[in-house]
Amino acid sequence: MRLHISALVFIVLTIGGLGWQKSLAQSDQEQYFDETGHRVTGEFLNAYKNVSNPLLLYGYPITDAYQDPTTNNLVQYFQKARFELYPEAPIGQRVQLAPLGYYLYVSGQGQPLRITDSSPACQTFLESGFKVCYAFLAFFIGNGGEAQFGQPVSNTEIQNNYMVQYFERARFEWHPELRTGQRVVLSNLGTQYFYFHGENPARLLPEPGSDTNAGVLSLRAHAFPLKAVTGAQGHQTVNIIIQDQRFLPVSDATVSIVVRMPSGQETRYIVPTPTNSQGITHYEFPFSSNAIGVAEIQISVLHGNLKGQTVTSFRIWW
């Protein structure tokens, strides 16, 4: 079993494009995004605009650009990507996408989906042996192919009741509840990796002077377990992040969780500590399972009259 990380975050945010036209009213050198209070400038902006649908492929910026202390490279996080600047690279190749799909994929986390070997609607990548099929293949080809997403690093799997597939720089999700033509969604791997990599949550805050007086109108809940794969018994910690409609942290939100084991047994918990000023809380709970499989964690959030929910999971492997 190949593990790229010890934790996996399932964050699914389907973002509409209503604010896109408003955000475009900027100069050629910089673009400010009122939705998150961050701006994109210079070569990062050129790379962002160099695709036909930046919101679909990258989402909104969730930080400003800053120097990564571990690499000294200039980096910037978007909902679905992390841009990295390599000054020594040739012009046009200086901005590169971090391989977040490769970093975040955990082998064995999902249930493999069997696809007929002879299906004509599939493309097999000889280097890895993985197949990309059907709507995923159409989306892959129609939005830049290998140059945009890299090689697949998994076949299609079932995770949290959705079909997903990991690529070097993305994770595809199939959402049958959405309209035709919009059912393939890219996971917010940029947001996921930001927290997994231990970045400073203060970088998510909008720049000084941003108009943030709209108040909390809705809740966005994200969660991920500390251990993606475990034995049949032990302790698990779930980390929970709550943001508002502008992706700003929501403090003092109360959280409850329901843990459903592979056998169907459920246990409910009230998280005693509300979210802090960075919108974060966590909870450790014991578990014991008499079956291997996926353990699901359902998260419910309350803040005033507002409610939010999300789901994550971990696999009991031995």
Image (tube, rainbow, N blue to C red):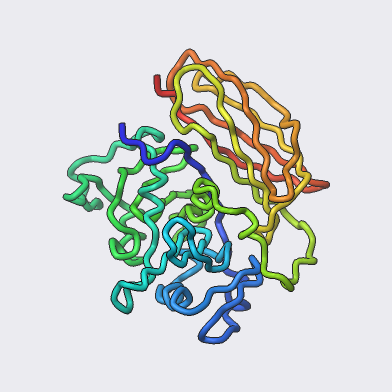
> Is residue 56 shown above or below 107?
below
* In this rendering, position of residue 289 left or right of residue 253: left
- Give percent across and percent down for residue 192: 51, 49
Of 16 and 30, nearer the camera is 30
> Is residue 136 shown above or below 272?
below
Of 103 and 310, nearer the camera is 103
- Give percent across and percent down for residue 242: 67, 48
The residue sitting at the top extreme is 290
- Give percent across and percent down for residue 223: 59, 41
Residue 135 visible within the image: no
> Is residue 262 shown above or below 247?
above
Residue 224 visible within the image: yes
Query: For the image shown, how many numbered marks are present on the structure?
Result: 0
The residue sitting at the bottom extreme is 27
The residue under the point 40% across, 34% down is 109
Q: Quadrant of the N terminus?
A: top left
The residue under the point 45% across, 28% down is 315
* In this rendering, position of residue 234 left or right of residue 128: right
* In this rendering, position of residue 298 left or right of residue 2: right
Which quadrant holds residue 96? bottom left
The residue sitting at the right extreme is 304
Of 138 and 216, nearer the camera is 216
- Give percent across and percent down for residue 62: 58, 62
Of 31 and 140, nearer the camera is 31
The residue under the point 39% across, 38% down is 106
Q: Quadrant of the C terminus?
A: top left
